Image (tube, rainbow, N blue to C red):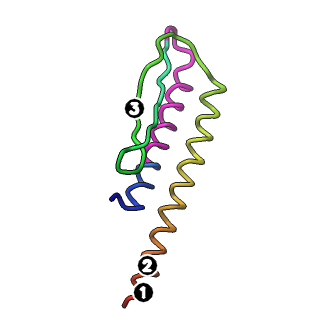
Amino acid sequence: MTTLSAISLSGMSAAQTALETSAHNVANLAMDGFRRRQVTQSTAADGGVTTSLTQATQPGDDLAGDLVGQLVAKNQFLANLAVFKTGDQMMGTLLDATS
């Protein structure tokens, strides 16, 4: 069984990958023939999230999609960070109670 901290860390890592990918897409908008990178997230069998990167088949941009993607990734990261912190606090409380 995967621990709560490992699951939330995988979520933070997936959010970081999504943020980096959308930032890469925005930074390269003006390049001729640029094909966007796309992130696919899926649930891992033992809990958590896995990511894979692909490249769009056609050149072109999606500035609105990338900007929304950055906001979504930020919020995903913050949500997983809150889970991580809460799990850490719960473990500390449990250890205090048993000692």
Residue denoted by label 1: 96
Of callouts 3 and 2, the N-terminal one? 3
Q: How far apart, in angstroms, are the residues tagged by discs 3 and 2? A: 34 Å
Residue 31 % position (x, y): 52, 13
Of callouts 3 and 1, the N-terminal one? 3
Residue denoted by label 2: 92
Which residues are drawn in magenta?
12-33
Whether 8 is drawn above or below 43: the answer is below
Return the residue nearer the eye: 23 or 7: 7
Question: Which residue occupies the extreme bottom position in the image?
Answer: 99
Q: Is mark 1 on a helix, strand or loop?
A: helix
Q: How far apart, in angstroms, are the residues tagged by discs 2 and 1? A: 6 Å
Residue denoted by label 3: 52
Q: Residue drawn at (56%, 47%), measured in percent from left and top?
A: 76
- Asked if marks 3 and 1 touch (Cβ < 8 Å), the reply is no
- Determine which quarter of the picture holds residue 73: top right
Residue 64 % position (x, y): 66, 26
In the image, residue 43 lies in the stretch drawn in magenta: no
In the image, residue 15 lies in the stretch drawn in magenta: yes
